[in-house]
Image (cartoon, rainbow, N blue to C red):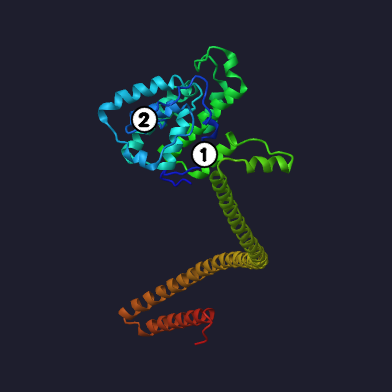
């Protein structure tokens, strides 16, 4: 299976199964050694490219040791690219790129060799008409949404026979077009896994919706025969393990969702109870507020009445004070006259007259003091 870093043993035979048959117009059979029928083992990337295209889409009979012996030769870059472009022109159905990517995923390779092989595979893909409208977004992620497998599938369905280099429309019937579509999607998906670290979940989801999408058979015997005759039991096992893991994860998420739903239900019930309590408390507080409002209204009314009464009392007091002040002034003024006359008589030697004036004045003053005390409520 595949990790997030892009290291993969992703269902190799299953992924490339549609490209296993040699496509029309593919390269001839591989060259044999002079001493026998054994195929040449590639020692360089250039030889690997030539070997892969000589196989014409058949599964590459390579081992991990073969890949370990391949090295990057900087001075061969132009020759590698030239050989690839020439060979790719004779691969109208993109039969070879999936086989290279499957071998790379299955056997592994050193990082420099891996990068160079991926560069060459990408070159073979983008030189094909299927990817013509997707070039900018393949090379420049910021140019738009990331290219997805469904876009590649649709592009393969719409390409014409002459665009892929075929002379006759008869060479591009439904089966041939479907072979191209499957190879294009498979190569694209494998490249994304190996180059960009796409996960196994995404790979399987895309492949099951676009490549492994044969309708289920109505008869169990037919389904059983198809499964029993599958060439790669390892691929079936890995798919089975993958979907078993997805089912476990789905069951776990379902359990977590149910637990969360139960907790939410409990919280909702508690909230409902709390809401009822708060509602009762709010009703009581509203009643209390209405009572306080009534008290405030009553006190306000009483205060207004008290203030009105005080205004009246003050007005009366002012009037009484003015009357009293006028009376006192009048009384004191009259006594001042008597005292003045008494002082004048005393200075002229009329003592008896002066005493008379003083006695009358004192009597009047005492009477006024007594009256003022009575007004103040003091009996002294």
The quarter holding residue 119 reads: top left
Above or below for 365 versus 116: below
N-term mark: 1 or 2: 1
Toward the viewer: 330 or 303?
303
**Residue at the spot of label 1:** 13
Going 58% across and 55% down the picture, which residue do you hit? 248
Toward the viewer: 117 or 357?
117
Cα–Cα gap, marks 1 and 2 = 31 Å
Going 65% across and 40% down the picture, which residue do you hit? 226
Toward the viewer: 309 or 184?
184
Q: Position of residue 73 (x, y in %)?
A: 27, 31
Which mark, by number, is residue 34?
Answer: none
Q: Residue furthest bottom?
A: 380
Nearer to us of marks 1 and 2 is: 2
Q: Residue furthest top?
A: 167
**Residue at the spot of label 2:** 35
Q: How many neighbours does mark 1 have within 10 angstroms: few (below 14), some (14-19), or many (20 or more)?
A: many
């Amino acid at each position: 299976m595949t990790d997030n870093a892009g290291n993969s043993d992703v269902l190799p035979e299953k992924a490339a199964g549609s490209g296993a048959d040699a496509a029309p117009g593919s390269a001839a059979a591989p060259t044999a050694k002079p001493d026998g029928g054994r195929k040449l083992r590639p020692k360089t990337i250039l030889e690997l490219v030539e070997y892969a295209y000589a196989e014409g889409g058949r599964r590459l009979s390579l081992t991990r040791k073969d890949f370990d012996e391949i090295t990057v030769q900087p001075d061969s870059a132009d020759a590698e690219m030239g050989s690839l472009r020439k060979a790719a022109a004779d691969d109208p159905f993109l039969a070879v790129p999936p086989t290279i990517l499957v071998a790379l995923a299955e056997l592994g390779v050193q990082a420099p060799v891996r990068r160079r092989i991926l560069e060459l595979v990408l070159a073979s893909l983008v030189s094909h008409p299927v990817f013509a409208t997707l070039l900018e977004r393949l090379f420049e992620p910021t140019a738009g949404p990331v290219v997805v497998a469904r876009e590649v599938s649709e592009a393969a369905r719409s390409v014409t026979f002459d665009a892929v280099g075929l002379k006759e429309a008869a060479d591009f019937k439904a089966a041939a077009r479907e072979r191209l579509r499957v190879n294009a999607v498979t190569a694209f998906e494998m490249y994304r896994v190996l180059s960009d670290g796409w996960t196994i979940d995404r790979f399987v989801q895309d492949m099951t919706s676009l490549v492994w999408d044969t309708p289920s058979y109505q008869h169990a015997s037919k389904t059983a025969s198809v499964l029993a005759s599958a060439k790669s039991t390892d691929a079936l096992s890995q798919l089975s393990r993958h979907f078993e893991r997805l089912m476990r994860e789905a069951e776990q998420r379902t359990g977590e969702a149910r637990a969360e739903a139960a907790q939410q239900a409990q919280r909702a019930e508690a909230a409902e109870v709390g809401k009822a309590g708060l509602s009762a408390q709010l009703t009581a507080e509203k009643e209390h507020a209405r009572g306080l409002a009534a008290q405030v209204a009553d006190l306000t009314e009483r205060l207004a009445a008290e203030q009105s009464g005080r205004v009246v009392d003050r007005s009366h007091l002012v009037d009484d004070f003015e009357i009293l002040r006028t009376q006192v002034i009048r009384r004191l003024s009259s006594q001042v006259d008597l005292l003045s006359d008494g002082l004048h008589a005393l200075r002229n030697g009329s003592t008896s007259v002066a005493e008379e004036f003083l006695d009358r004045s004192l009597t009047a003053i005492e009477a006024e003091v007594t009256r003022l005390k009575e007004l103040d409520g003091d009996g002294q």
